[in-house]
Image (cartoon, helix red, strand yellow):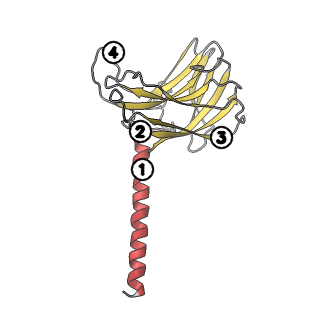
Amino acid sequence: MNHSKVRVIVVGLLMLGATRWIYAGSAASEVLRNGGFEEVGPEGCPVAWLCMGNGERGKHWEVEVVSDARTGNRALRLMATAEGRAVVHRSYPYNPQATELELGDLVPHRKGRFVFWYKVIKGDSNNIRVYVLPMKPNNLEATATRAVFVVPPNAPKGEWQRGEVVYDYSKDSGVRAVQPGLRINEGGTPATSEVLFDDISWAE
């Protein structure tokens, strides 16, 4: 085999590998739609997500899209006082009487990990968390234990930090899908806290 043919084969293999890598990355990003919060719905919550809280909105809790993004133009801000709670998770059909529902924006992979970026603005407690919620076929939370990432109480303020939470429900027949849940004051010691999230993605 001459050198020109060797070069052609090597280049072809490199291009094939690059194509597979690009496809894999694209496929993973499509698993979690709007993980960068760039698309915003008419009520101000990012498309494919649900935003809620406990207490009086604006006083005890707030969830809103802001321009202080790590990449792109938008990030998601969560704020809660010690008396409130901020809750964000995926959008999906809900009917507690149903036995099975469409997935909506849940993630149909029972094993994997969620990678995300966060920026603590205020808070020194262990109450800022990212959960993996295991979901049953009727889109209610399963009894399996949540996987969790706890933002360190001593995390630097005003700096983007990378987080990752790994989960595995592959052997639990009661779990059909999962979803990431962003929380303040659902676990840990309640305290006034504020955090930004951006670039949430799913990976194997």
Residue at the spot 41% in from the left edge and 21% down from the top edge? 143
Please tell me which of labels 2 and 1 falls first in the chain.
1
Q: Is residue 171 visible?
A: yes
**Picture quarter with the N terminus:** bottom left
Label 2–label 1 contact, CB within 8 A: no
Left/right placement of residue 129 relative to residue 141 reads right
Relative height, residue 192 to residue 33 (above, below): above
| Residue 26 circle label | 1
Label 2–label 3 contact, CB within 8 A: no
> Closer to us: mark 1 or mark 4?
4
> Closer to us: mark 2 or mark 1?
2
Residue that extends furthest to the front in the rendered view of this protein: 171
C-alpha gap between disc 3 and disc 1: 23 Å
Q: Is residue 91 visible?
A: no
**Category of crowding for the residue at label 2, using alpha-carbon neighbours closer than 10 angstroms: few (below 14), some (14–19), many (at least 20):** some
Q: Secondary structure at mark 4?
A: loop
Q: For mark 3, what is the residue?
A: 160
Relative height, residue 97 to residue 154 (above, below): above
Residue type at mark 2: give it.
Answer: Lys
Q: For mark 2, what is the residue?
A: 111
Residue type at mark 3: give it.
Answer: Trp
| Residue 96 circle label | 4
Residue at the spot 67% in from the left edge and 18% down from the top edge? 191
Label 3–label 1 contact, CB within 8 A: no
> Closer to us: mark 2 or mark 4?
2
